[in-house]
Image (cartoon, rainbow, N blue to C red):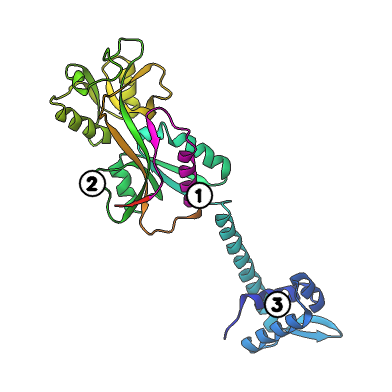
Amino acid sequence: MKVQLQQLRYFVAVAETRHFTHAADILGVSQPTLSKQIHTLESSLGAPLFERVRGAITLTVAGETLLPLAQRMVADADAALDAVGDIVGLRRGEVRLGATPSLCSSLVPGILRTYREEHPDIQLHVSEGSSQDLIANLMAHALDLALIVQPEHGVDPVLETTDLLRESLVVASVAAEPPPTVARQLELVELRHTPMVMFRKGYDIRDVTLHACERAGFTPKFAVEGGEMDAVLAFVEAGLGVALVPSMVLANRPLLRATPLAPPGMRRTIALAQRRGAVLPHAAAALRDVVTEHIASGRLPFGVRALSTSATDG
């Protein structure tokens, strides 16, 4: 027995109106088409559903039995279509974005503001963590997208990344105090006797800073270590020491000065990562578009350069 949803929809319309012509008008089909579909449904079920008594349409016992079931099935189908339509039309849904702390405090707010203005009904979930943690969460299907610092060795082959930005690291110090160098740019080795505020272990910038100092021939002197981005900046503002930080995070820190490093300087690449070959939910695909449009708009702070948005292999 093969029963089609359309046949049930036709049956419900006739049962509720008790009139074939009125039901056909409501459905937007001809009466012969409607009658044919009802006849096919009755043949599939092996029982008549309607009978005419003195010119009126009434339900048979089989029709009475089928009606509540058919009404529920048609209603469920309509609800399913509406739900999918809401998701496709971005009237419902959610997106899970991961980002490093430095990006959460600098780049991400502007992106989410634009996304919220365009898609106010989408629920946003933001996870803050190190690039390593974000990559692990992507691979575990806990995130849809992640803004990460591109590792020098690349990412796992199950992921793909799109390079977005090239960002310079600068020396953050208290703006009201003398700068860490009398020159326009600072040679990293000039920090060999300067107390530094250092990020916690496992933090992306910590490893980059330590390797750069090692290449410059010295081991940095820690004033305090173990903080996240906001804590490190607050410690620098308190005069505890200087710190190497991404240039973006100083955009709204008037108490701090940014001193560029002398060439070749230190830079990092910001990338958007996702699972390779995964079909993104509509809400996440829309967020990906907002990210690339935000970068392409050029509204970027000093020391940040947009890159061509092309996917790279892990």
| Label 2, label 1: how far apart the Cα atoms are | 29 Å
Q: Mark 2 points at which residue?
A: 153
For residue 244, say whether it is visible: yes
SS of the residue under disc 2: loop
| Label 1, label 3: how far apart the Cα atoms are | 40 Å
SS of the residue under disc 1: helix
Q: Does the magenta stretch include residue 67?
A: no
For residue 142, say whether it is visible: no
Residue at horizontal 75 percent and vertical 75 percent from the top: 29
Q: Give the range drawn in magenta.
A: 284-310
Residue at horizontal 53 percent and vertical 47 percent from the top: 122
Q: Position of residue 90 (x, y in %)?
A: 56, 51
Circle nearer the viewer, 1 or 3? 1
Q: In this view, does 87 lie to the left or right of 180?
A: right
Q: Earlier in the sequence, mark 1 or mark 3?
A: 3
Which of the numbered marks, if any, corresponds to residue 286? 1
Which of the numbered marks, if any, corresponds to residue 11? 3
Residue at horizontal 65 percent and vertical 89 percent from the top: 43
Residue type at the position of mark 1: Ala
Q: Is residue 90 left or right of residue 175?
A: right
Q: Quadrant of residue 74?
A: bottom right
* Of residues 233 and 290, the one drawn nearer to the viewer in this rendering: 290
Q: Where is residue 128 in the image (x, y as percent from the top left)?
A: 37, 38
Q: In which quarter of the image is residue 13?
A: bottom right
| Label 3, label 2: how far apart the Cα atoms are | 63 Å
Quadrant the N terminus occupies: bottom right
Q: Position of residue 189 (x, y in %)?
A: 18, 21
Residue type at the position of mark 3: Phe
* Of residues 248 and 27, the one drawn nearer to the viewer in this rendering: 248
